[in-house]
């Protein structure tokens, strides 16, 4: 396994992360409608809780997508062609890509891209161990911004991989921008295999984001604990509760932290005022009807080559092709 990026300095990165968290927390918590970007949900504790979420009985997306991928991997691999390289955006622990690589004919390389170097290395090492002889070229990068791909033999067909319905955590505008950028990175003639969660019964959606065991609530509340830990904020965790709401107009699940009473909270030399019932909006998870998803992809220069779903219509996996 070789590294495409070796200028990583963990201490400088930790300082930059703290400064960025502070800037986002001040901007988001002093706004008229309080918000925090969902990327901050994933510190070590958030990542641990997310691993629990994906095994919950109510959280259908992960197991449904995995079953779909199991069924469609050989067809997707055949369309990608022999000797293709897989570029995974936000690879994290790289749990699902093995299904695809196993089905491919002599894949040229696996290029996992993630901003978290520890997860990236761990996932890359696991894939390398499971696929002896495969060239694995990890790239430390924020996959929502343009980044250079490692050098690959000229003419290598490229297959992007973006599972997990992470696209749903972007606004539709940001999703379109991401798809456009992915198209520019992968280049003409490339393909993208992507998972997108679907609109469905409100009760099923709300249960998936507010499970009976309270794991999703702990995941959301950890954001306040993180502000206390990393910024010395003084949030009283008993004075907030988790809420998952279906926004029917925007076809998205929203996660909020609801203030249970009027309160003032100290954070980084400021006093943040909360009314009773006021919320911090912490995450959107957009759900896509197939026609809306293909329209979004078309706006970003991708056409849908194949679509696979499950029998209950819960989740979709799409193979997109540049242009059409
Ligand atoms: C990572 N992402 C696709 C998850 C989702 O379903 O939107 C994050 C999540 N939030 C609460 N539960 C899971």
Image: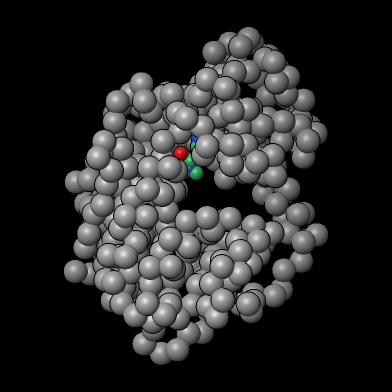
For this view, does 278 lie left or right of residue 204?
right
Image location of residue 139, percent across then percent down: 58, 70
Image location of residue 160, percent across then percent down: 40, 66
Residue 299 in sight in this render: no
Q: Which quadrant is the N terminus positioned in?
A: bottom right
Residue 230 in sight in this render: yes
Image location of residue 286, percent across then percent down: 37, 39
- Please report the residue visible at 67 percent of the width from the left and 49 percent of the height from the top: 20
Above or below residue 169? Residue 105 is below
Pick whichever, 281 or 286, lies toward us: 286
- Please report the residue visible at 43 percent of the width from the left and 67 percent of the height from the top: 102
Pick whichever, 110 or 225, lies toward us: 110
Above or below residue 139? Residue 273 is above
For this view, does 77 lie left or right of residue 255?
left
Image location of residue 188, percent across then percent down: 30, 77
Q: Which quadrant is the C terminus positioned in?
A: bottom left
Pick whichever, 276 or 72, lies toward us: 72
Q: How many marks?
A: 0
- Please report the residue visible at 36 percent of the width from the left and 25 percent of the height from the top: 204
* Coloration mode: one colour
For this view, does 289 lie left or right of residue 192?
left
Q: Residue furthest bottom?
A: 154
For this view, does 128 lie left or right of residue 6?
left
Pick whichever, 17 or 75, lies toward us: 75
């Amino acid at each position: 396994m070789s590294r495409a990026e070796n200028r990583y300095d963990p201490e400088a990165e930790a300082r930059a992360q703290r400064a960025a968290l502070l800037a986002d927390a001040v901007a988001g918590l002093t706004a008229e409608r309080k918000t925090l970007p969902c990327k901050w949900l994933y510190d070590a504790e958030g990542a641990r809780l997310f691993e629990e979420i994906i095994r919950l009985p109510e959280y259908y997306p992960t197991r449904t997508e995995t079953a779909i991928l199991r069924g469609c991997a050989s067809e997707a691999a055949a369309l990608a062609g022999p000797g293709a390289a897989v570029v995974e955006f936000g690879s994290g622990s790289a749990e699902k890509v093995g299904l695809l690589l196993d089905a491919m004919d002599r894949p040229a390389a696996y290029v996992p891209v993630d901003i978290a170097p520890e997860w990236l290395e761990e996932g890359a090492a696991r894939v390398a161990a499971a696929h002896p002889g495969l060239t694995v070229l990890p790239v430390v990068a924020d996959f929502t911004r343009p980044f250079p791909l490692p050098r690959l033999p000229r003419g290598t067909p490229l297959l992007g991989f973006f599972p997990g319905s992470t696209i749903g955590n972007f606004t539709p505008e940001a999703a379109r921008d991401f798809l456009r950028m992915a198209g520019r990175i992968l280049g003409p003639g490339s393909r993208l295999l992507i998972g997108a969660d679907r609109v469905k019964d409100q009760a099923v959606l709300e249960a998936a984001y507010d499970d009976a065991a309270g794991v999703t609530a702990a995941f959301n509340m950890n954001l306040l604990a993180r502000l206390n830990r990393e910024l010395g904020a003084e949030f009283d965790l008993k004075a907030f509760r988790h809420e998952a709401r279906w926004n029917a107009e925007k076809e998205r699940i929203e996660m909020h932290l609801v203030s249970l009473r009027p309160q003032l909270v100290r954070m980084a030399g400021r006093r943040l005022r909360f009314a009773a019932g006021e919320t911090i909006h912490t995450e959107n998870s957009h759900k896509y009807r197939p026609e809306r998803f293909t329209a979004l992809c078309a706006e970003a220069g991708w056409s849908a080559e194949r679509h696979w779903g499950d029998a209950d219509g819960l989740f979709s996996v799409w193979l997109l092709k540049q242009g059409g």
